[in-house]
Structure formats: structure tokens, C-alpha cells
Image (cartoon, rainbow, N blue to C red):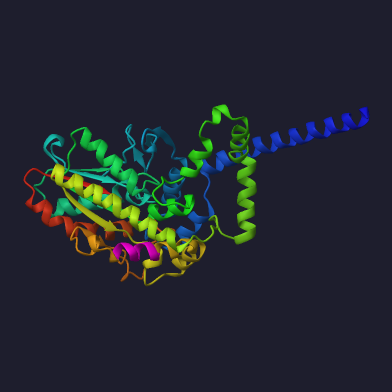
Amino acid sequence: MKNKLKLTSILFRNCLLIFLLLEIGLGVFYNYHDENGIDSNTKKLIASGAFGDLNDETIKEIYRELRQQDMLWEPYLHYRFKPMNGKHNTIDENGIRKTLNLSLKDSTSAIKIFCFGGSTMYSAGARDAYTIPSELSKLIHKAFPNKNVEITNFGCHGYTRATENIQLQRELIKNNVPDIVIFYDGVNEVISAHQNNEAGLPTNAYNRKKEFKIAHNYKKRIELMITSSNLYRFITTLQRKISSNSPYKQLGQRSDSLATDIADTYLGYVKISKSLENTYRFKVFNFLQPVIYSKKNLTTAEKGYYKDQQYYENLYNLSYEVIRKDSLMSNDSTFVDISNVFDTSKKTIYCDFCHTSERGNQLVAERIFKYIKPVIRKRIIPVLLILI
């Protein structure tokens, strides 16, 4: 009996030692990889030609900085960006990404353009000077060289229309009242609903639910320790590569009824923003953003992204269609469906199923500017707000 206990003790000790060595070794590897490495998707992006003449090392630097980004807890929003002073990604102490403000002369009297939204408005994969807000700044400066304009990029990874409405309200409470509000939505509304199997919840809400009261629950602490370990990351990455040969986690299908819930929730937040519009006298525009499923001419690289992330397609198509057919949207001139913005492009625009290259950001900015240009021209006391 003593020999069995001794053998069990030795086996347990050895297993624990092996686990610790693997955890430390993988930690060193992942730390180096995340700081200096290049993932398989970045290699695909370089080969795809989506970044035109941009040199390979710059593309690697852009995506290396994206992997290095971190978040801080933020009341009501769940999280916001930590400050970052990268070569291509600059984020200030308030979690706001740097925008090229060519027309800014005096901040106190400027036409204020606040760009709120998800990672597509943040323009993940683009340099500071080539984000959607920065491209919009270039267009405004060219059309209105004498206008005093300040654009702010509030975009943050995973933010949904619900989060954007809260951001808008927080600005209004601070008496930071805009003249124009532009929402550029669609992607995260579907992603968050797919993740949580429920419309209207924040992105990754299921993780926050698992973490709730973790300080008072040993089981949750152990689960979190396991799922956040380097070994767990290694095993799940290996499983994904073996099962699907894809860098993306392959998700299951969701019911068609969820698409209706997504559309109804989106429309509900549109109504709230329109009521704020009437109270605070700004102008709202609601842009329905493009995804890879809506691009007519897919390149070879884009066909690969389409195949890897096809599990979202049904929800996008159905929810977008419900939104388009809604009587409020179909009769509202401020609702603009720009999901077809890349239809005439035969070049690689997408970097995955929703994020676009710097050229894609330029095309989106051009389409947005077409609709807001008349409003900017008429504005005497100007302020502009954009939400994605």
C-alpha cells in the first residue's frame, strides 16, 4: 500500500513538473512569437497583394502591433484600449486612436467628427494615417480646405451598436454634442449574437459571465487558470489545425430566428439614436457595412477567407435582409446600405471576412463622404459623429 502511494506521489510530482516546464516553455515561446513573430494569416495577407506596394516588413509590424494591443476595464462598455505608442498604431490615454486631422485649426470651434464603432472603424490592419476616419479627413480637407474640422476615432475591437449608443450618450452627458452621427454597423452585431446565441449582448459576454464572482468560486478560478494557460492555447490551436487546417475557430450554425432577433435589436438601437437626434439636434446616418459574403468578385485570397469563415454567412444574409425590408429603414433617407461598396473591385480588399485593407478603408470613406458632404457644407456650427 505504501509503495502504491509512493508511486502515485512520484507520478503526480513528475506530471506536475512536466506541466510546469511545458507552461513556462510555451510562455517564453508565445511571448517571443507575439512580440516578434509572424502568424500564418499575416503570411497569407502579404501573399494576397491586399496591401499593394507596402513592403512586407511594414505589414508584419502592423499586425505585430495588433497582437500586442491590450484592454482596460471600462464601466458600461466592458473594456477599452490601453494606451499604445506603436509605429503604426497610436492610442491615447483615453483609448482613442490617432487620426490624421489635416483640417484642424482650433479644437474649441472645430467641426467635430467622432468615429465610434468596432475594429472595422478602428481599421485594424491599417496604419494611423490610412484608417477610415483618416481617409475621411483627407476627403473633407480636399473638399473644404477652409473648414476647421476635428475627427476622433472611438472605434474599438468588438464594440456593437449597443456599446456605440452608450458611448454616444456618455459624450452627450459631457455636453460634447455632435452635428452628425454616422453609424457603420453589421459585423459585430452578428458576431456577438453568434457567440452568445442571443442578440444584443456585448461581444465576448459569455466570457464575462463565466468570470462573474470568480473571487468567491474556486471551481471558476480553476477553470479560468486552465483555459488561460499557455498549454491550453497550444492544445486548442493544434486541434484547430488538425481538424480544419484553418487559423480560425470553426463555429456551428445558428437558427434563422436569431437573424430576426439581430435585426430587431439593431432597429431598436436605431430608434434610440433617432430620439437623441431630435433632442440634441444632430444628424444621424446609419450605414450598413460590407462583409466578404456581399462582395461579387472574390479574389483567390478572399475565396479562402470566405471558406474559412462561412459559418457567419447565413446570419448575415438573413439579418441584413430583414433590416433592408423594415419600413423604418426603407423610408428613412439616413439609412444607407453600403454592403455593395466593393462590388466593382476585382482586387483583394478583405483581410478576413470583414476587415479591409487600406484601399478598402479609402473606398468606404469615399462612400460615406458622398452622403455627409451636403450636411458639412451647410453646417455653420459644425460637429460630426461617426459610429461603426
Say if the magenta span includes residue 319.
Answer: yes
Who is closer to the viewer here, 245 or 5?
5
* Residue 363 visible in the current orientation: yes
Q: Quadrant of residue 54?
A: bottom left
Who is closer to the viewer here, 253 or 358?
253
| Residue 87 screen position, x and y as percent | 38, 41
Who is closer to the viewer here, 64 or 285?
285
In this picture, residue 200 sits left or right of residue 239: left
When the figure is inspected, residue 31 is found, relative to residue 362, above or below; the finding is above
| Residue 267 screen position, x and y as percent | 29, 55
Say if the magenta span includes residue 194.
Answer: no
Q: Main secondary structure of the magenta part?
A: helix
In this picture, residue 87 sits left or right of residue 112: right
* Quarter of the image that includes the N terminus: top right
Q: Residue at x 49, y 44 (%)?
A: 206
* Residue 348 visible in the current orientation: no
| Residue 52 screen position, x and y as percent | 37, 61
Q: Residue at x 60, y 41 (%)?
A: 227
Q: Quadrant of residue 243?
A: bottom right
Which region is colored magenta? Answer: 317-324
